[in-house]
Image (tube, rainbow, N blue to C red):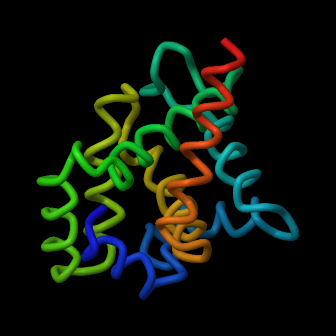
Amino acid sequence: MNTDVESILAARSEWLSDIAAYQKDLVDQLMQGRDPIYAAQAWLQAGSPDTAPFGALQGAKIFFDKVLDEIHDLLCSPEQFQEQRESLAREYGAGKITFTAGVTAYISPALGADPTMLTPVVAIILTIISQAGLRAWCEVQSERRARQEEQK
């Protein structure tokens, strides 16, 4: 795990303040009195013409799980994506939004999704990670993925 990325995530708790105002306003409405995960899934249900073929409209939970998987791989896999994590840590100095944008840029091709559509979801997930701690979040996601594999 990259300590620099872990330190960045530990130092920030609110990643949503850096996204575009129109996105933040909509996410704030979705989050009123609700769990952040609900807001992320609701955002994905809004749809986009650039959404991956399995689609977020009918399968927001499945798509959300795919987003979690990609972020988990990027931030938690010690042998994978080391160069990308180091790049994210370096880019963070250029501004906070570059970290969110960087994470989004790394995962969007694997998901076949438009980065603009994913940015608020990534910001929500980074907020959750910052509140839980990267190591704890990585462990929870590893357990979630293992349970999903057992159910197949």
Dividing the picture into quadrants, the one containing residue 124 is bottom right
**Which image quarter holds the C terminus?**
top right
Decide: is 4 above or below 104: below
Q: Which of 46 and 68 is in front in this view?
A: 68
Outermost residue to the right: 33
Q: Where is residue 63 in the image (x, y as percent from the top left)?
A: 58, 30
Q: Which residue is drawn at 54% across and 52% down?
A: 121
Decide: is 47 above or below 123: above
Q: Position of residue 71 (x, y in %)?
A: 42, 47
Q: Nearer the viewer, residue 43 or 99?
A: 99
Q: Position of residue 137 (x, y in %)?
A: 56, 60
Q: Residue at x 57, y 47 (%)?
A: 141
Q: Which residue is drawn at 25% across and 76% down?
A: 4
**Which image quarter holds the N terminus?**
bottom left
Outermost residue to the bottom: 11
Dividing the picture into quadrants, the one containing residue 111 is top left
Q: Position of residue 102 (x, y in %)?
A: 26, 57
Decide: is 6 above or below 88: below
In the picture, measured across the screen, residue 152 lies left or right of residue 102, that is right
In the picture, measured across the screen, residue 67 lies left or right of residue 77, that is right
Decide: is 69 above or below 72: above
